[in-house]
Amino acid sequence: MNAESNRKAQLLANVVEHVDITAYDARPVIDAMRKMSFSSRDTARAADIFNMALEDKACSPWLVLAGSTSAGGCMHVYRDMVKFGMVDAVVATGASIVDMDFFEALGFQHYQAEGPVDDNVLREHYIDRIYDTYIDEEELQTCDHTILEIANRLEPRGYSSREFIWEMGKWLAEGNAK
């Protein structure tokens, strides 16, 4: 392995691991946060509000998320919130749906950045930065080409984002991913 590819491998060495909220009981931690300050207390209050929303049958909780939180390790949290009926709707950016979720469904991963790295160095190695997370640009281009492949097999007409996301899922369900 030459020095250039070795450097890229070093930069992409630590995979972002998505948290599994079903693996532990976070309630004692949230309860302890009530006695803390700043965002900790806010987190406990947010948990209380969310629990009230879940108990109120007239309430329709929506998950509104930014794409970067998916890349940061929250994908399984969002999946499980839908799976366990904790949200009625998901509002997400295209980046979250394509460049995070679909990207990983294709078998690619996001990586933890280790300290400051010059963006020119990242560019030389075809690595993109999402805050303190890296993504391999060549894999991202493969993801984009896959989206083009899906679009090209559709009847030419206007599609809602919901319809196109359905087609992305259908493509995956057909076993087209790695």
Image (spheres, rainbow, N blue to C red):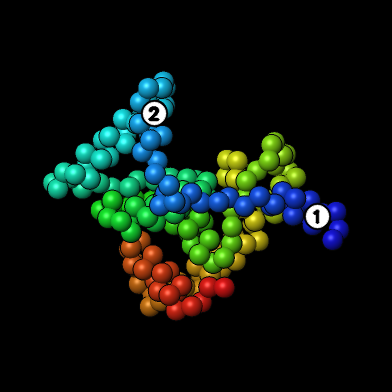
| Label placed on residue 79 | none
Q: Is residue 101 left or right of residue 16?
A: left
On the image, the x and y values in percent for residue 75 come to: 45, 53
At label 2, the amino acid type is: Ala
Q: Is residue 161 above or below residue 111?
A: below
Dots 2 and 1: beta carbons under 8 Å? Answer: no
Q: Residue at x 36, y 68 (%)?
A: 166
- Please tell me which residue is depicted at 37% across the width and 22% down the height of the picture: 35
Please name the amino acid that badge 1 sits on: Asn
Outermost residue on the left side: it is 58
Q: CA distance from mark 2 to mark 1?
A: 44 Å
Q: Quadrant of residue 143?
A: bottom right
> Residue 32: which numbered mark, if any?
2
Relative placement, left or right, of 88 versus 65 is left
Q: Residue 15 location, x and y as percent?
A: 62, 52
- Residue drawn at x 27%, y 34% is 48
145 or 36, nearer to the observer: 36
- Disc 1 is placed on an element classified as helix
Q: Give the number of marks.
A: 2
The residue carrying pointer 2 sits among few (fewer than 14), some (14 to 19) or many (20 or more) residues within 10 Å by Cα, namely few
Q: Tell me the residue that label 1 is attached to.
A: 6
Regarding residue 94, the answer to whether it shows in the image is no
Sequence order check, earlier mark of 2 and 1 = 1
